[in-house]
Image (spheres, rainbow, N blue to C red):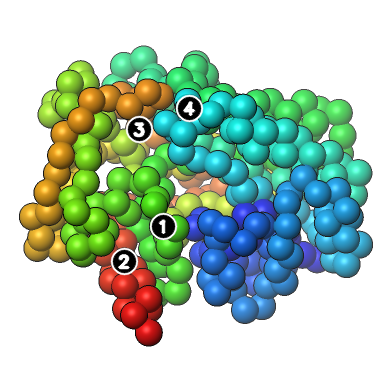
Amino acid sequence: MAVLGTGGAGYIRQPLGWGLGGAGGGGRGVGPPFPGFRWAVAPEARFYQGDIADAALLGQIFAENRIEAIIHFAGSIIVPESVADPLAYYENNTVKSRALIAAAVAAKVPHFVFSSTAAVYGTPDGTEPVLESAALRPESPYGSSKLMTEIMLRDTAAAHDFTYTALRYFNVAGADPRGRTGQSTRGATHLIKVASEAALGKRAGMDVYGTDYPTPDGTCIRDYIHVSDLANAHLKALQRMRAGGGSIVANCGYGRGFSVLEVLDEVKAASGVDFPVRFAGRRPGDAVLIVANPSVAMKELGWTPEHDDLAFIVRTALDWEDHLGRRNQL
């Protein structure tokens, strides 16, 4: 049996691909050539290039492979971009996900793991780590587009022999500690990625958006999760459904937050570089503070984070950025 992972050469899909063999099923990947990188796909995986809403391609994949589960990573993820172009996000994240879910039902694929997001919560009430039962009030089309897909999965599971796990990612960062994969997309907007590029001279400093939020230092607070821990949560979700577990939604974070300025201090300390930081106004769609309560993932999935350490996350991100710089010079 095989597992189909969409977004086949993307950031979070990469480390999972290296672990799918150990999960009891070979990996299959489908995705466009960009922003993923074909060289980052695990060598034992079979890669299909194309669109996740292409019915003919999906039919070919299901005909050529015994697919028992889909892990759906593909999608657009930049909050300000979603505010500027909401229809593109509803097309790529919601409409195409609907096509993929329909193809899964038609092919009788029983299990589905979905990359959702903490953006479905918006800014939660209070400062306590947020539970999955919290009010869902997305503040951007990105968050809304992901929530719509969660709703489609819920309703599909009620109507068909179909089980899903929706993993609500908090802020994913870092790189494979063994140096095999990491975030490689040019022009990425993730804070630790951008700060690492600035520290290594790939950017002429960086911008901080908003210093007047109601937080201790005026900047947004986020829960940063290492990409390897997140990849492991997907494997645990797959194992649970294989064992007969029902559909669930689970937060993927560590339960503690760091402000933008705290993260930048960590990157500067780890790199030894005091890169320029420019302060700008708030961006539309950014939540003030959001931190996960990961108890559901820990209890239901048996997930135990291994890299709950901001310094480690930053160090692996910097190491990967340095690796990319040397790779591009060859």
Q: Nearer the viewer, mark 2 or mark 3?
A: 2
- The numbered mark at residue 321 is 2
Of 53 and 203, nearer the camera is: 203
Farthest residue, direction bottom: 330
Of 309 and 258, nearer the camera is: 258
Residue 149 at x, y percent in the picture? 67, 31
- For label 4, count other residues whose C-alpha is less than 10 Å away and answer few (under 14), some (14-19) or many (20+): few
- Sequence order check, earlier mark of 1 and 4: 4
Q: Which quadrant of the figure has residue 203? A: bottom left
Residue 281 at x, y percent in the picture? 23, 25
In the rendered image, which residue does mark 3 sit on? 291
Q: Is residue 286 visible?
A: yes
- For label 3, count other residues whose C-alpha is less than 10 Å away and answer few (under 14), some (14-19) or many (20+): many
In the rendered image, which residue does mark 4 sit on? 84
State whether residue 31 is above or below residue 24: above
| For residue 127, side relative to residue 328 (left or right) | left
Q: Is residue 266 visible?
A: no
